[in-house]
Amino acid sequence: MPQMRWPSHCVMPSGERDHFTTDSHKGAALSALFYRYGKHHRLSYEERCYQLRFQSDCDILSGTMACNSILKSTLIAIWLTVVSAGCGSTPEEVQTSDESSGAHEEVAFRGEPHAVMETDRGTILIRLLPELAPMTVDNFVELAETGFYSRTVFHRVLPSKMIQGGDPNSKDNDPYNDGQGNSGKFLKAEFSSHPFSRGTVAMARQAGDPDSSSSQFFVVLERSPEWDGDYTLFGEVVEGLEVADEISRTPLSKDERLISRPVVAIRIKRIVIEYREVTEQAEESEENQAK
């Protein structure tokens, strides 16, 4: 049987060379390459030797087939080793990582949607109610997250009864076009039987057109049965209702064309959407606040 001829650049202890045999010089070169690759990936000397050790009793007739089979086995073994070393993680670890990622997303979006509305006078926290008006809530969340409401003004006030905002026209310096703007998208009405109590939040719309709500909304400051079932209610204030009360008491313009408009521009700085758990204690507090 021909002995393996080791390339000069493949360093092997002389006492071990006799353990390696193959059918050709080509096999020897490949085996030396595999040996060095295994060394690069910090396999132990015994592991490398085991990968490259060939059967010593191959005869000339069957040696080629046997050695080719062993070369294939060796290649597969080294490929698996390299993949494992290169990836740095096992399938079990990858699965665990995916599960952890899913758990993180579940935690991040656990709870009910809330809108944190920061104004010049303080912060108003609104609990959104997708169970009453899913399309309206989705639209409001989208506008808030894109910064649509930032720097808009509460352009219409009914003292101690309602404050209204959300018009993009109120960002400019022309107060006479306030109340006429929209987002470019109009929503189908989502009326419900939920009463318009103190703290409820609903969409403004054009008179006579129930499907004309877009971006403008209003916060109710006292029980208003005349609005029940006539506007899309999509939220309720859970904190900061006193801020809305303060805004409603702002002196109003005496200009007949700016009726119900505060003389001082009170802006929404931004609206941030958060997901929070609602406890029974919080629900009781909301009910008491609405009375």
Image (tube, rainbow, N blue to C red):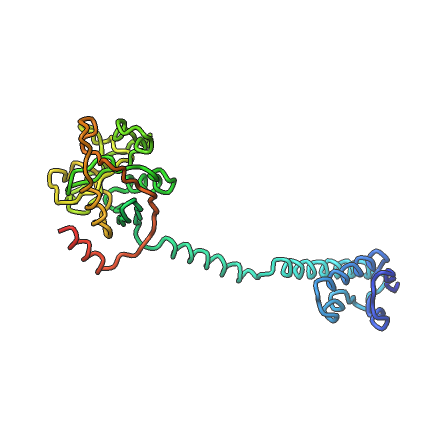
Examine the rendered structure and indicate whether residue 261 appears above or below residue 56. Answer: above
Examine the rendered structure and indicate whether residue 239 appears above or below residue 145. Answer: below
Left or right: where 81 falls relative to 223: right
Seen at 75% across and 61% down, the residue is 70
Residue placed farthest to the bottom in the image? 15
Of 17 and 274, nearer the camera is: 274
Examine the rendered structure and indicate whether residue 72 appears above or below residue 55. Answer: above
Horizontal and vertical percent for residue 54?
78, 66
Seen at 84% across and 69% down, the residue is 17
Q: Quadrant of the N terminus?
A: bottom right
- The total number of labels drawn is 0
Horizontal and vertical percent for residue 95?
50, 59
Seen at 14% across and 40% down, the residue is 228
Quarter residue 87 falls in: bottom right
Left or right: where 79 falls relative to 116: right
Quarter residue 157 falls in: top left
Horizontal and vertical percent for residue 39?
74, 64
Of 24 and 125, nearer the camera is: 125
Horizontal and vertical percent for residue 31?
79, 60
Quarter residue 225 falls in: top left
